[in-house]
Amino acid sequence: MIIMPESWEDIVLRLLRAAQTRLPPDVKWALEAAAAWESDPTARSQLGAILDNSSRAEFLVRPMCQDTGLPVFFVKGRIPPGIEASIAAGVARATAAIPLRPNAVDPLSREVSGDNIGSGPLVHCRPSDADYTELSVLPKGAGAENMSRLAMLTPSDGDDVIKDFVTRTVLQAGGRPCPPTVVGVGIGGTADACMALAKEALLIPLDQENPDPRLRRLEEELFVALNSSGLGPMGLGGDTTVLGVRALAASCHTASLPVAVNLNCWAARRASVRVHSDGTVEYTQGAFP
C-alpha cells in the first residue's frame, strides 16, 4: 500500500489504528491454522473465540482488546529531526480517536497522563545509511509485558541452557500473557540491549525465515518444544501454546551471555511503514483499512 506524502503525526495515527484493530495477515493465518489442527475441544473453542473477536474488531474498527497496551516505536534508517515530538502528537491523537485506553502512568505516583505519552513516547532509534525511514509500532499490553525475563548466563552454558530458560519462562507465565503467544528472544549485547532485541524480534513476521541458520534452528526447536508442552490457548490445555518464536542476536562481551524473553499475546499487534526520500509512504507490515 503506497500513498503520497502524509505528516508523521498522521502516519502514527494510521499505524496505531491498524495495529489495534486488525490482525497482521501472518498472525491471522497462524491462528486459523492452529484452530484447524487443534485436537483439544476447549482449545478449539478458545481459538474460535479469538478469531471471532478479531473479525468483529476489524469490522467495527475497534481495538481487539481492552488493554490497548503502551505503544513502543522503532525508527530505522534515516532519523528525521523532531520525530519523537511527531510520534507523541500522533499517540495523543490516536488515544482520543481510536480510542485507546490511557495506560501511561508515573511509575511511583501512578498518576495517569491521559494521553499515553506521560514522560515521553518509548522510541528505539536504529540509524543507518538507508534512503528511507522505517517506523514500526508495537503496542505492549501488561499481561504479556509483565512476563518479560532476562538471564545473564555464562558463555559455557550454550544452546541447551538458552532453550531451557526460554521454555521455563513461557511455561511459568502460564495463561497470564493470553496464549497462544509469539515469543521474542534476544541473545547477546548488554543487559539493556538484549531486552530491546527480544522486543524488536516481535516485529519479524511469522512467515519470514530467519537468515541466520543457528537462530532459525533455535526458533524451530523452541516452537516444537513449547507446542508439545500442553499449556495451550489461555493456559487451558491444548496443542497451541505459541504461534511462533522469533530471535535476534548481537555481539556481547567475551565473559557474558545475556538472554532475554519478551512475549506478545495472541493479538501480536504491530504495524510498520517506510517513508522514502521522495516523500512517498509505503505501509509494509500490518493490515491497513
Image: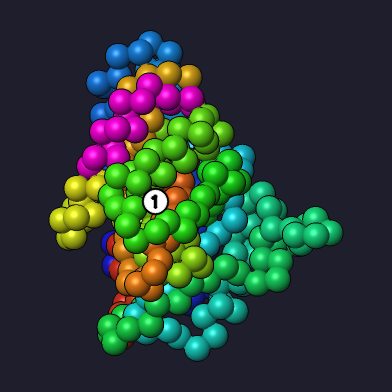
The image quarter containing residue 79 is bottom left
In-image side of 161 versus 6 (left or right): left
Q: In which quarter of the image is the N terminus?
A: bottom left
Amino acid type, mark 1: Gly
**35 to 81, vertically: above or below:** above
Element type at marker 1? strand
**Pick the front one: 275 or 162:** 162
Task: Name the residue located 47 percent from the left edge and 58 percent from the top edge.
Answer: 152
- In the image, residue 82 lies in the stretch drawn in magenta: no
The magenta span reads: 220-235
**Pick the front one: 232 or 256:** 256
Pointer 1: what residue? 184
**Pick the front one: 254 or 242:** 254
- In the image, residue 232 lies in the stretch drawn in magenta: yes
Task: Name the residue located 51 percent from the left edge and 34 percent from the top edge.
Answer: 172
Q: Is residue 176 visible?
A: yes
Task: Name the residue located 42 percent from the left edge and 56 percent from the top edge.
Answer: 153
